[in-house]
Amino acid sequence: MPKPPAILVVDDEPAITETIQEILIAHGYQASTAKDGLAALEQLEKDRFDMVLIDVVMPEMGGMELLRQISLLYPETMTMMLSGYSSIKDAVAAIKLGAYDYIAKPVHPEALLFTIERALQFKDLRLATRELEWTLKGAEALGLQFLELAPEVEEFKVLEQLRQEAPQVEDWQQLAHLFLEKALDLSQATRGSIFLLQPDQDELTCAAQRGLDTDHNYPSGGSPAEGIMGYVLQHGRPLLVPDITNDPRFYDPHQSQPPRSTSFIAMPVMEEKLWGIINLSDRQDRQPFTSRELFLIWLLARVMAEILSMKKQEEESRRINQVLVDTKSELDQMKGYISHLSKSVTIGLAVIDQDMRLCSTNPAFAKLLNRDESNLIGEEEPEQPRVLLVLDDITEFEQMRQRLAFSEHLAILGKLSTCVVHELNNPLDGVMRYISLALLKRDDSREVERYLSEAQRGLNRISQSVRSMLNLSQPQPEIKARSTLLNQLREAVKILMFQANDQEVEVTLEMSPGFDNLMVASDFYMVFVNVIKNALNAMPHGGKLQISGVEELGRMFIRFKDNGEGIAPHNLEKIFEPFFTTKKKERGIGLGLAICKKIIERYGGQIKVDSLVGQGTTVTIELPLPVADRCQKL
C-alpha cells in the first residue's frame, strides 16, 4: 500500500501546530511539527515530506527565509504559508519564492484540507510533466523513426497515412484543416485550432479551427507573447493541463467567469524552426487529457512540421527556378551586345567546352595565335558546360611582376634576418661565455656544473625562439571538444541528484578507466537519464542505486542495479513495448525504455532487464567496443 502524504507543520505556537496536526491525521495524512525554521530544517534533513506548512512570523528563522531554504535544498517539496497578518504583498512574495498558496489565520479546516489536496495534485502534475519532458527528449533522438517502433498501433497507422496524403495538398489552409481533423480524432477533443506564424512576421494567424466561438480560451491572432500560446511558444515545449483550476500558472480564482475548458493541450509545431501551434480542448468523454494524447499530438506536430518544411523548400525551389528563367532571358538579350563588344577589344576571348574544344572566338584571339579564326572553331555540342578563356600578351607585365616579387622577397628576408639575429644573439653570446668559464674552471666540478646549467638554459631559450618561429609558419589544427561516455553518465547522474537526495537514495558510480577515453554521440545521455529515472521511481522511500561499467571480451557492459520494488514477471516481458507502463495514467505513457532500446540498437548494442519483486532490478546495457566508430558514421 502507498504511504499517505507526509506533512510538516512549522509554527512557534504549540496550540496551532497541535490543532492542525490533529486535523491532518484525522483525514489520513502523516503529520509532524516543528517550533521554528531551524527545527524544520533539521526535520527535513532526517525525514522526507511531501508538503510543509510554514508560519510567516517565527523566532530564530522567519518563514520567508525557511521558504527560501526549502526551495533551494528540497525543490520537490510543496510549501504553503500561514499568517495571522496576511497582506497581498507578502502573498505575492511567497508565491514568487515557490509557495503554492498563502492562507490567513485563523485556519478553517475545510479550506486548509481543500488547498492541501490541490497542492498535492499539482505536485503529481509537476512530476508527470517532468517525466513526459524526458520522454519527449528521448523521442527527439529518433524523430519520426519512432513510428517504426510499433507500426501495428492504430494511431501510428493514422500518422503514417497522413505523411503520405499531406504532401498532395497544395493550399496551406486546407493542409491546416486536414491536420486539425486528425488531431481532434487522435485526442478525442471536440474543439481545437491551428495557428501559424506569418513569414517574416512575429504574428500568429488562425489557419484552421473547429468548435470555437468568440469566447474561446485562445486568442484569434496577435503577438505570440500573449496568453497560453505565448507561454508555450516562449518555452518551446508542449503543454498539457489536466485541470486548469489546479494550475497556478494559468488559473485566476478571482476572474469573473470560470474557464469554459478546464483541460487542454497546446503543442508547438516545430522542427528546426517554429511554424505555429496546435490547441485542443474539451474531450468527448469530459475527462482530462492524458500523457498518451499529448504524445500522439507531439508526433502529429512533427509530421506537420516535416510537411510544412518540405512545402517551403518546394516553394523556394520554384522561386529559384523562376529567377533562373528570368536570368536566362536577360542573358539572351545581352548576347548580341557581348558579341559586338568582344570584336572590338584587344584581349583575346574564346569559349571552350568541357572537352577543351573551341566553340567561339573573337578576332583578337586568332590574331594572338597567328591563326585563321575559321580554322580554330570546331563543332558545338549543345547543353554542355562552357568556360570563357581570356588570352593576352603579358610578357612585359610578367617581367615587371617577377622583379617586384624578387624585391619584396629580399625585403622580407632582411627583416627576418634582423629578427633572428636579435632573438638568438643575446642567448648565444651567453652560452659561449658560460662554456668559456666552464673551461677555465674545469678543475672545480661544482662551478663547471653551474656554468653548464646556465649554458643549457640559454640553449633552451634559443630552441624556444626557433620553435616559436616555426609554429608561426605552421599553425596547429583546432582540437574539437567531444564528450566521453563517462562524462555523459556523470551528467545524467548530476541532473537527477535532486530527486535522489529528496528520496534518500544513495547513488554510487564505479567505472573502469576505458570509459573516460571513449568518445560517443550524445544520444546515450538520454538513455542514461531514462534508466536512472526509472530506478529512482522504483525507490520512492529510499534505497541504493549502484552504477558500474566494465569491459569484457571486446564489449562494454554498463549496469544499473537498484534495491527497489522490482518488476512482476508478467510485466517484465512487456516493458519494452510502446505505451506499456505500470505507473498511474497521469504519470507516464510507457515510452522511455522503448526509446532507449531503439537508440542502443542503432549502435549495435542491446539492453536487458533482470528483476525480482521486492528485491530490486538490474538494467544491463551492452555495447560493442568500437561504438565510437559507429557514432561517427551515424
Image (cartoon, grey):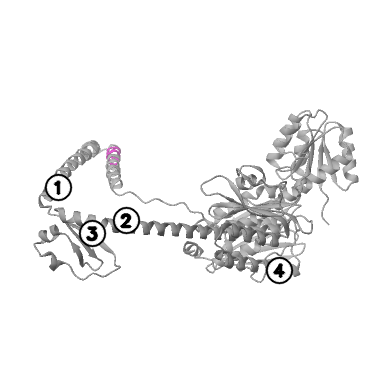
Query: Decide: marks 4, 1 in contact (CB < 8 A)?
Result: no
Res. 577 in view: no
User: Where does the magenta region start and end?
Assistant: 448-456
Res. 35 in view: yes
User: What residue did someone put label 2 on?
Assistant: 330
Q: In this view, does 35 lie to the left or right of 224?
A: right
Q: Tell me: residue 524, above or below residue 220.
A: below
User: What residue did someone put label 1 on?
Assistant: 401
Mark 4 or 1, closer to the camera: 1
Q: Which amino acid does label 1 sit on?
A: Arg
Q: Earlier in the sequence, mark 4 or mark 1?
A: 1
- Which residue is at a point 14% across and 47% down the rendered structure image? 401
Q: What residue type is labelled 4?
A: Lys
- Which residue is at a point 84% across and 43% down the rendered structure image? 114
Mark 3 or 2, closer to the camera: 2
Question: CA–CA distance between discs 3 and 4?
Answer: 69 Å
Question: CA–CA distance between discs 4 and 2?
Answer: 67 Å
User: What residue did someone put label 4 on?
Assistant: 574
Label 4: how many Cα within 10 Å (few below 14, some 14–19, many 20+): few
Q: In this view, does 286 lie to the left or right of 204?
A: right
Tell me the element at label 2.
helix
Taking the view exactly as shown, the residue that stands out farthest to the left is 370
